[in-house]
Every structure is written in structure tokens, then in C-alpha cells.
């Protein structure tokens, strides 16, 4: 049994596929909205140097990643140990060396990795236009901040499309719903931070 | 009678008797996951020519009671026990055994 099959098997016996997917979407959403918020905040305030904006966004992205990893690991670890103990009680047997014991140790690590990496990766993607511009690569048509905002809106729309596919509903409707959340957030930031 | 005599002669001249388990029926308790198919496959992988037949006898809130029939040319009971344990199962009893003795000509 190779590593991928083993991982799939352990996720299947703990029935954590849906949890992993949920964590991925929730935290990617967090990451995208946070980046959107920071970038719009910089856009409506006094102009700042691009390197300052990148540092602020990168700091928030790393913090989101670390928060995702640690919070998911601690909570999932407790949940998995609780589930394993319940199963051990039902089986009247120590299951630490069985597939269930391995799953109780592996799944919190995997979920933590997904939970931490999804906001980090999505944040880094949103920061791409800023990095490119900072590295001296000219962006067509838009300023780097607007390009990042459009990139963030596009990624949020794609997250909605992904959710739509899971729920087996219209991908367009689901995508527009998440896009609407981003638009409302941006409007609120403009209203409150732009004064 | 003559065959019996021949066997005795062979045994007395140092040829051993090999006893191999051909069939066992086990009473096993397992969690709902892995499911019956995966459980069966894991047991079948314990030997090269095993034929495994699994019947779910009872389903509780967290567990399932199974009757597992395993047939093979030479069943390795320890390997099967280990496969059951790895999948989180618990062997309750051996309900039926079929063993065959053969003259080990090697």
C-alpha cells in the first residue's frame, strides 16, 4: 500500500474527507478576505510603499497559516483521540497499533496542514501582482493593488464554484454568492476605512 | 492397509508429516470502518491463494459481528490474526477448522 493509498484509507476510516474539504474552503475564504481587506485598506489610506504593503500582507498570511495549523491540530487531535477512546470502549480493546490508532495520529496532522496551507497559499496567490510589480515586472492595464483585488475576487468566485460542485447546485450561482460576500466586504471597508 | 504401511515406513525413515490448515471459520468483532469489503481484502492479502467469505451477523452502534470463512492451501493463522488486528478487529473465537496432514516428501 503506497503512501497516497494509505492516507486515503486513513481518511476514509475516520470519515474525515468532508472535514478536510470544509477546513480547506473556510480557511481559503478567510485568507482571501483578509488579503482583500488589507489591500483595500491600503488603497483607501495614504499611499504606502509597495514593499510595506507586501510585508503587511505577508505577515497576515503567515499568521493565518500558523493559526490554521495550530488550531486545527489541537482541536482535531482532541476529537480524534475522543473518537478512538469511544471505539476502544466499544471494542474492549487497545486500538493504538491498529489502523484506527494510526488514523487518530495522522488525520489531525493532515487536517492541520490543509487548514494552515489553504489561507497561506491563497494569500500568496493574491500577493503575486504586488510581488511582480515590486520585482520590476510591469503589469498590463492595472495598478498592482487593483490587480491583486481582482485576483482576490476571482479566487473567491472560484471557491464558490468549488462549493457549488460539492453541493451539486449551479456553479454560477454559488460563485456569484461568494463574490457578493467579497463585494459587500470591500464596500464596508471603503465606507468605514475610507473616511 | 498397504498404503498405511507404506506411510509408516516413510515416517520411520525420517520423512516428516506436514500439517496444513485448509479452512478456518472465525468469529470476529470489528468497527464499522473499514467496511466489510476492505476488511475481507486485507485478510485475503495475508496469503497467496486465500478465498475469504465474510458474513455480517450483527450490527451494533459502533461495531459489527462477523463470521469469516477462509480457505487456502496453507493458511497462516498468525498472518490472518495480524491482519484482523491491524484493521482494528478483535478475534473472538475459532469456530471451525479443517486441517489436512500430508507426507512431506521434500
Image (spheres, rainbow, N blue to C red):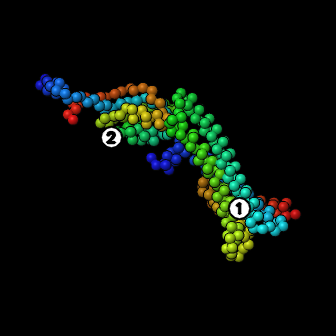
**A84 lies above or below A146:** above
Marks 1 and 2, how far apart at CA: 57 Å
For label 2, the residue is B49
Residue A105 pos. (x, y %): 57, 40
Residue drawn at the location 73% of the way across and 63% of the way down: A54
Q: Is residue A119 above or below residue A81?
A: below
Q: Position of residue A84 (x, y in %)?
A: 58, 35
SS for dot 2: loop
Residue A176 lies, with reference to residue B97, above or below; the image says below
Position in image of residue A77 (x %, y %): 62, 40
What subunit carries mark 2?
B
- The subunit carrying tag 1 is A
Crowding near the residue tagged with mark 2, few <14, some 14–19, many ≥20 C-alpha atoms within 10 Å: few
- Foreground of the two, A164 or B91: B91
Which of the numbered marks, if any, corresponds to residue A18? none
> Could you say which is closer to the camera, residue B83 or residue B93?
B83
The part of the image, by quadrant, that contains residue A118 is: bottom right
Q: What residue is at 38 percent from the left and 39 percent from the top?
A: B46
Locate residue A22, reporting x and y percent: 64, 50
Q: Is A43 positioned to the left or the right of B104 in the image?
A: right
Does any portion of residue A180 appear in the rendered image? no
Report helix, strand or loop for mark 1.
helix
**Residue A179 placement: quadrant:** bottom right
To which quarter of the image does residue A38 belong?
bottom right
At x 73% / y 61%, what residue is drawn? A55
Residue with the mark numbered 1: A179
Amino acid at each position: 500500500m503506497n503512501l497516497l493509498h494509505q492516507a486515503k484509507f486513513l481518511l476514509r476510516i475516520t470519515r474525515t474527507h468532508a472535514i478536510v474539504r470544509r477546513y480547506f474552503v473556510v480557511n481559503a475564504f478567510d485568507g482571501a478576505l483578509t488579503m482583500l481587506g488589507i489591500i483595500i485598506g491600503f488603497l483607501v489610506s495614504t499611499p504606502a510603499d509597495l514593499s510595506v504593503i507586501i510585508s503587511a500582507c505577508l505577515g497576515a498570511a503567515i499568521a493565518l497559516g500558523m493559526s490554521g495549523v495550530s488550531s486545527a491540530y489541537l482541536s482535531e487531535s482532541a476529537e480524534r483521540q475522543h473518537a478512538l477512546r469511544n471505539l476502544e470502549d466499544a471494542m474492549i480493546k487497545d486500538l493504538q497499533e491498529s489502523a484506527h490508532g494510526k488514523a487518530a495520529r495522522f488525520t489531525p496532522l493532515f487536517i492541520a496542514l490543509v487548514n494552515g496551507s489553504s489561507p497561506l497559499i491563497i494569500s500568496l496567490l493574491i500577493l503575486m501582482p504586488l510581488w511582480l510589480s515590486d520585482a520590476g515586472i510591469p503589469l498590463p492595464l492595472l495598478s498592482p493593488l487593483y490587480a491583486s483585488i481582482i485576483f482576490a475576487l476571482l479566487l473567491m468566485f472560484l471557491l464558490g464554484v468549488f462549493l457549488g460542485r460539492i453541493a451539486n447546485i449551479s456553479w454560477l450561482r454559488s460563485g456569484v454568492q461568494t463574490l457578493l460576500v467579497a463585494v459587500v466586504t470591500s464596500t464596508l471597508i471603503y465606507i468605514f476605512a475610507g473616511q | 492397509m498397504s498404503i498405511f504401511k507404506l506411510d509408516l515406513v516413510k515416517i520411520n525413515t525420517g520423512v516428516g508429516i506436514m500439517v496444513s490448515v485448509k479452512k478456518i471459520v472465525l468469529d470476529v468483532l470489528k468497527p464499522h470502518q473499514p467496511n466489510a469489503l476492505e476488511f475481507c481484502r486485507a485478510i485475503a492479502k495475508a496469503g497467496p491463494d486465500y478465498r475469504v467469505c465474510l458474513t455480517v451477523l450483527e450490527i451494533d452502534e459502533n461495531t459489527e459481528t462477523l463470521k469469516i470463512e477462509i480457505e487456502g492451501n496453507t493458511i497462516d493463522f498468525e498472518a490472518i490474526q495480524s491482519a484482523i488486528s491491524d484493521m482494528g478487529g478483535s478475534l473472538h473465537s475459532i469456530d471451525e477448522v479443517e486441517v489436512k496432514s500430508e507426507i512431506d516428501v521434500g
